[in-house]
Image: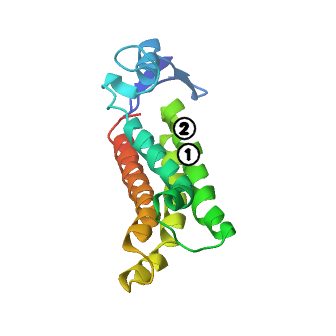
Amino acid sequence: MSRSVTTSHGAAWSTRTPTMSWRPVASFERMTTLVTRGDGSPGQAGGAAASPSLRPFAAIMLCFAVWVTVAPYAGEQLGFEVNTRAVVELVDHVLPGAVVIAVALAWLVADRLALPAALVAVLAGFWTSGTHVPLLAPAARDEVGLGSALWHALPAFAVFLLATAASVLVVADRRSGGR
C-alpha cells in the first residue's frame, strides 16, 4: 500500500507500508519554478520580477575611488598640498583607493558580487576616512588650508558613505526577493 503526503512547503513524499521508507517525489514544474524567474532566466524563485540593479553605486564609487587614489598627487598640481610623507599617502590613499577600484570593477562585471564588493569598499572607505578625521582639526585652526583638507578628506568620506548605503540597499534588495 502506498500513499502520498504533501508537506507545508510543497514537497511531495510517498510512503509504502509496511517499511515506511520515505523518498521524494519531485515535481518538474515545481523544480523549474524554484530555479527560474518568470521570464525563464535563472535566479529568483517564484517568478517575481527582479529589482533594478544597484550598479550605479559601483560606478559612482569607482569615480570617488579614483579621486581618493590621486588626491595627494593631483592636489599638489592644483595647489591643495598637505605636508605628509609619501608612505602615509600610499597607505591612506593609494591602497584603499586601489581596493575600492578593484571591487567596484568586480561589481560592475558581476552583479552577484555586489554585497562582498560593497562590504570590502565599506572597510576601505572606513580606513581612508578614519585616517583623514585628524586632518580636519588643523584645518579648523587654520594650520592647514581648508581647501586642501577638504580635497584630501571628501572623497574618502564619500566612498565610505556610498559603500555603506550600497551595502544596506543590496541587503534590503536581497531580502525583498531581488538578486
The Cα atoms of the two marked residues, 1 and 2, are separated by 6 Å
In the rendered structure, the answer to whether residue 167 lies left or right of residue 49 reads right
Of the residues shown, which amino acid type is indicated by label 2? Leu
Describe residue 92's horizontal placement relative to residue 54 as left or right: right
The kind of secondary structure element at disc 1 is helix
Visible in this render: residue 22? yes
Q: Which residue is mark 2?
A: 105
Above or below, 69 relative to 10: below
Choose between 16 and 4: the one closer to the eye: 4
Q: Quadrant of residue 85?
A: bottom right
Determine the residue positioned at 43% across, 19% down.
Answer: 36
- Its colouring scheme is rainbow
The amino acid type of the residue labelled 1 equals Ile
Residue name at image x 48 percent, y 49 percent: 118
Q: Residue at x 38, y 86 (%)?
A: 141
Q: Secondary structure at mark 2?
A: helix
Q: Quadrant of residue 144?
A: bottom left
Q: Residue at x 54, y 38 (%)?
A: 105
Q: Nearer the viewer, residue 13 or 108?
A: 108
> Quick check: 67 above or below 83?
above
The answer, for residue 16, to whether it is visible in the render is no
Q: Give how far across and how far down residue 139 sits, in percent.
A: 40, 79
Dot 1 corresponds to which residue? 101
Q: Is residue 38 above or below residue 112?
A: above
Mark 1 Cα-neighbour bin, 10 Å: few <14, some 14–19, many ≥20: many
Q: Describe residue 52's horizontal placement relative to residue 27 as left or right.
A: left
Q: Residue furthest right?
A: 87
In depth, the one of 120 and 97 nearer the eye is 97
Asked if marks 1 and 2 touch (Cβ < 8 Å), the reply is yes
